[in-house]
Amino acid sequence: DVPGHSSAILAAYPELSCFPESGAHAVRTGAPFMDWNTGGRPAAIYENTLCPSNEKVYDFLDKLMTEVASLFPFEYIHTGGDEAPYTFWEKSPDVKKLMQREGIKDMAGVQSYFGKRLERIILSKGKKMMGWDEILEGGITPTTALMSWRGVNYGIEASKSGHYVVMSPTNYVYIDYMQGDISTEPRVYASLRLNQTYKFDPIPEGADANYILGGQANLWTEQVYNIRQAEYMTWPRGFAVSESLWSPKERKDWDQFVLKTENHFMRFDYAKTKYSPAIYDPIVRVTRDSEQYFVELTTEISGLDIYTSFDSSTPDNFYPRYAKPQLIPKDAVMMRIITYRGDTPIGRLLSIPVEDLKKRVR
């Protein structure tokens, strides 16, 4: 993934940076290295981009792509190009000289220059280049393919311009996102439930279908620490991605999909494969009216009943069944929620402190 996401390369080969004498190049596992709260393109705290004005970079990439091309028989090499901060490029006298020499107006143009040189290397190996949608910003060659992750609009735009596209939008197929209530999931910054993944359409309205190669789900694992959790994050959302890619959208049927998914749950139970049961858990929303807070509960699938308590007891199907938004009592400390199918508890017991519930107000 170049030119950004390259701290490991720079730690091994600091001479490929814009500031090789800084002595600051290291692999920072878990330590902050980017400022994501800039309101725009992220800023680098430490240099983690290859230097586009450094000829050694292109010699290195030529050798690297020679090895990659010989190892993998596939048509495309995905080179990344996403989330590349311009922080250290903007400080570099050599990058400024490059811009003057090549008539480049801005940093997006600098990244475009880098990408085009990299593509020439890849084409020389008999391969084609693909990159994340950021590479569109400075301009790409007609032969470059795109993977659209920041929604589908970049992919639509690219397909209409004659570029081949793989759709991989965060809001449908980023399966590193939480899939259940935040009280049951390892905390990540966004959520993606199964029914939303099932709505994935790899050929959205406005796209030129002739240039859509397909779609891809992404399970980024910087917050997934073992293979069992990787299984949990993949299933059952992997089923939804698969059906969205191999079935015309006119033939998709959510209720039938749920039945098939539950059949596969039995297979997974037998195979000891971990999966998420979040489709059985209630969806919790909190609203506020003056000083009163209300909890609204829905289910992702039909045929479930919801039971709740605010007195720290564990509800079952002899408690009052949820029917309308519930007022949080002023003296309540804990809300507990569970779903049943008939007389059988099927969802996980959610235990949510009232203090946390109030933070969810929309």
Image: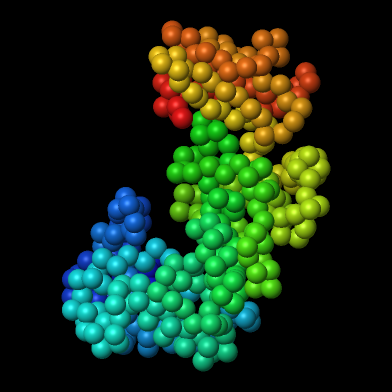
Foreground: 257 or 186? Answer: 257
Q: Quadrant of residue 48?
A: bottom left
Residue 255, given in percent of the width and then of the height, sits at: 78, 39
Q: Is residue 263 left or right of residue 3?
A: right
Residue 290, given in percent of the width and then of the height, sits at: 41, 16
Foreground: 206 or 119? Answer: 206
Q: How many marks?
A: 0
- Residue 77 higher or lower than 149, as above or below: below
Q: Is residue 235 visible?
A: no
Q: Is residue 64 left or right of residue 92?
A: right
Identified at 67% across, 56% down, the residue is: 201
Residue 118, given in percent of the width and then of the height, sits at: 44, 83
Q: Quadrant of residue 112?
A: bottom left
Residue 261, given in percent of the width and then of the height, sits at: 76, 43
Question: Which residue of the protein is positioned furthest toward the bottom in this rendering?
Answer: 124
Identified at 58% across, 65% down, the residue is: 156
Q: Is residue 352 visible?
A: yes
Q: Is residue 116 left or right of residue 212?
A: left
Identified at 53% across, 37% down, the residue is: 185
- Residue 117 higher or lower than 156, as above or below: below
The colour style of the image is rainbow
Identified at 28% across, 61% down, the residue is: 44
- Residue 18 higher or lower than 167, as above or below: below
Q: Quadrant of residue 162?
A: bottom right
Q: Quadrant of the N terminus?
A: bottom left
Foreground: 164 or 207? Answer: 207
